[in-house]
Image: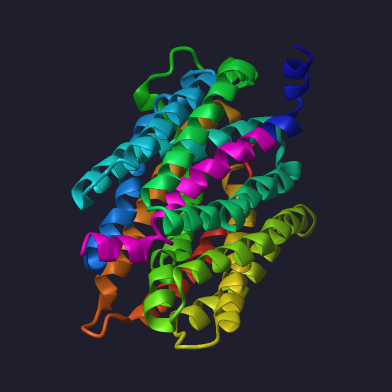
Amino acid sequence: MVFIKQLKNRKLILFTLALVNFIHIVDSMLIMPLGDIFIKEFQINSREYSLLVSAYALAAFCSSIVGVFYLDRFDRKTGLLFIYTGFGIGTLACAFANSYVQLVSLRIFTGFFGGMIGAMVLSIVSDLYKFKERGAAMGILFAAFSAASALGIPIGIFLAAKSSWHLPFIVIGIMALLIATFVAFVFPNMKSHLSVQDEKIDFSKTIKAITSDNNQLNALLAGFVLVLAHFMIIPFISPYLIANVGLTQEQIALQFFCGGIATVVSAPFIGKMTDKGGVMRVFSIVMILSFIPTVLITNLKVVPVWLAISFTTMFFVFASGRMISPNTIITAAASQANRGSFMSIKSALQQLAIGLSSLIAGQVIFIGEDGVFHNYPWVGFISIFFGICAIFLVKRIRVAKGN
């Protein structure tokens, strides 16, 4: 009982959610560093690979739309437990896929549950932390992304290299189910958002509350474009580094380790700087700096391993950093009463952007007869274009009352 009371401390809740994010992010990212394995094992081309990457995201988009109508109607704990359990089951099932079609189908199933995890986590954090201190909290959550890159992905690649690609999904699925059990028995109830809702609210009012607010619409559009910029080059980084630059699968693991370790330090720092220096100032600087590694990576030729990893580490730091500041103000665009629904639409559009960015990149890039990837620089330029658009869109967002 003493431990349960201690868990009600919001910092402990925050770190629990960071762990939830860690497992979820490892699962959603794992397809990409193992891309070379899937391309060779299933004998698929760049377009089929991009569909494998985007299957999870497009399913997550659909489930997030469903979540718009339900996330604000239940105890946050109940919602988190339901979607995280489904996510764990789906991930575990992926481990037993023995064909391309089966794996794509199971990624769709997993994505349906996984798509609502981010919205739920952000809703809980936004309920617990006021806007003025939310930047630091977001830094902790995004540090989970860094930890997933530094620890989860390299371990997953190592397990796949030593055994098969099936093993990492078994481990992730089991861990997710264990965390879901922890949430069920230890996590506190969170119902404060229910007290500020209209008991008679219906689905049409849920949508109207968001679509009638230009500020929320601006925030959703900004978040959508931001993710397009962020994920445009990411799905093909690992396959490109293997095929065009000459890195091995083990060196790809080292790339994620170095990038993850660097962002474990940089993400909380950028979060604190956001609280002190302001969202737009920090966001604009980090976004512009992120264009440098984007150009370097997408134009990279055969170079020493240390140089390639230096460029990807730089990308990890600035690419993840440019997501922290804008998410601080995007989450503050909605009031507490409809925050869960807003976050779900935000998550839906984010997943749609991830899926679209992968499909767009798959249409631009092609694998030549020489086995290398072509047209990757064009994908980098598209990413930069969306990044510039995001700067102007984020500038239009205002903080809603009650944040």
Give the x, y percent position of residue 21.
Answer: 56, 41
- Which residue is pictured at 43% across the width and 59% down the height? 161
For the N terminus, which image quadrant? top right
Residue at the extreme front: 162
Q: Is residue 147 above or below residue 124?
A: below
**Residue 320 lies in magenta, yes or no?**
no
Viewer-closest of 162 and 227: 162
Quarter that holds the C terminus: top right
144 lies left or right of 367 = right
Q: Is residue 210 above or below residue 77?
A: below
Is residue 201 toward the left or the right of residue 401 in the image? left
Whether residue 398 is visible here, answered yes or no, is no
The answer to whether residue 289 is seen in the rendering is: yes
Give whichever of 81, 95 is nearer the camera: 95
Question: Along the horizontal axis of the image, is 40 left or right of 10?
Answer: left
Q: How many marks?
A: 0
Q: Horizontal and vertical percent for residue 198?
A: 50, 16
The answer to which quarter of the image holds residue 34 is: bottom left
Question: Residue drawn 57% across and 44% down?
Answer: 22
Q: Quadrant of residue 93?
A: top left
Q: Is residue 38 magenta?
A: yes
Q: Residue at x 73, y 31 (%)?
A: 12
Please name the residue shown 68% across and 35% down the image: 14
Magenta region, residue range:
15-43
